[in-house]
C-alpha cells in the first residue's frame, strides 16, 4: 500500500497541468499591440499568431518554453510558470532589431546613353546566340502564330466582333458570292445547254 501511494504521488508530481496562456505583445514602451507576431511551442510543435491588435491566446503545459519572433524585432523566449494556475495573462515587450539590407544598385550607369553603349557592346556566349537565333527563326514564329491557341482576351474580342457584325447587318439581306456557289454554276451550265441565253431579248431603254 505504501509503495502504491508513493507511485501515485510521483505520477501526480510528474504530470504537467494545461495552462491557458493569453496576453498582449507590444513594442518597447509603446502600449499598441504588434500584429502578426509568431508564438511557437517547440515541444508541442504548434503555435499561434497575434491578431490585428497584438492579442494572443494559446493552450500550453506548465513549464513549456515559448519562442516569440517577429520581423524587425529581437527574438525572445518565455517560460510558462508551473505555479498551479490554469490561466495566465502576460504582456510581452519586444525590442526592435533593425536590419540594414545591402545596397542594391539597380542602374549602374549614370545615363541612358552609356547603358545603350554597354548593352550593344555586350557579347553573349555562342550557345546563347545560337538558341536566340533558333527561337527567332521566321519558320518557327509562323508555326507558333498558327498553332498557338487563343487566350481569354482574344476569344472575348472575337465574340464582340461577331456581335458587332450581326448588329450592323441586321437590317440588310445577306450577300453571298455566286462565283463560289456550285449550285449557281450548275444552273448556269444547264441554261447554256438549253440555249436560254440566246432566246433572251434585250431591249434598250
Image (tube, rainbow, N blue to C red):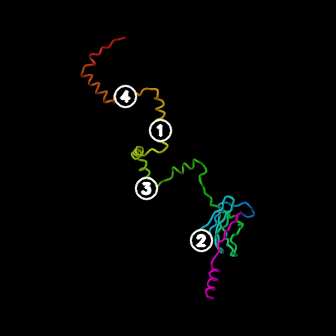
**Residue 28 vs residue 59: left or right?**
right
Choose between 200 and 124: the one closer to the eye: 200
Q: Position of residue 138 (x, y in %)?
A: 41, 45
Q: Is residue 64 above or below residue 32?
A: below
CA gap, disc 2 and disc 4: 80 Å
Q: Position of residue 204 (x, y in %)?
A: 35, 11
Tag 1 or tag 3, which sits nearer the N-term?
Answer: 3
Q: Residues within 10 Å of mark 4 (few under 14, many from 20)?
A: few
Q: Position of residue 1 (x, y in %)?
A: 62, 88
Q: Secondary structure at mark 4?
A: loop
Specify the quadrant of the image occupied by residue 141. Answer: top left
Q: Residue at x 49, y 33 (%)?
A: 164
Mark 2 or 1, closer to the camera: 2
Mark 3 or 1, closer to the camera: 1
| Number of the label disc, if any, that sits on residue 44 | 2
Q: Secondary structure at mark 2?
A: loop
Choose between 87 and 167: the one closer to the eye: 87
Q: Position of residue 83 (x, y in %)?
A: 70, 76
Amino acid at each position: 500500500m505504501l509503495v502504491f501511494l508513493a507511485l501515485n504521488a510521483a505520477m501526480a508530481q510528474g504530470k504537467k497541468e494545461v495552462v491557458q496562456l493569453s496576453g498582449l505583445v507590444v513594442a518597447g514602451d509603446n502600449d499598441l499591440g504588434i500584429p502578426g507576431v509568431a508564438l511557437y511551442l517547440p515541444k508541442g510543435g504548434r503555435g499561434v499568431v497575434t491578431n490585428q491588435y497584438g492579442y494572443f491566446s494559446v493552450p500550453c503545459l506548465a513549464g513549456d518554453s515559448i519562442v516569440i519572433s517577429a520581423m524587425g524585432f529581437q527574438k525572445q523566449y518565455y517560460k510558462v510558470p508551473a505555479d498551479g494556475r490554469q490561466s495566465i495573462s502576460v504582456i510581452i515587450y519586444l525590442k526592435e532589431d533593425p536590419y540594414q539590407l545591402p545596397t542594391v544598385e539597380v542602374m549602374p550607369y549614370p545615363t541612358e546613353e552609356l547603358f545603350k553603349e554597354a548593352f550593344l557592346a555586350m557579347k553573349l556566349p555562342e550557345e546563347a546566340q545560337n538558341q536566340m537565333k533558333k527561337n527567332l527563326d521566321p519558320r518557327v514564329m509562323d508555326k507558333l502564330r498558327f498553332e498557338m491557341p487563343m487566350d481569354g482576351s482574344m476569344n472575348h474580342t472575337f465574340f464582340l466582333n461577331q456581335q458587332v457584325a450581326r448588329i450592323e447587318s441586321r437590317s440588310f439581306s445577306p450577300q453571298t458570292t455566286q462565283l463560289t456557289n456550285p449550285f449557281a454554276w450548275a444552273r448556269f451550265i444547264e441554261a447554256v445547254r438549253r440555249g436560254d441565253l440566246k432566246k433572251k431579248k434585250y431591249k434598250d431603254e
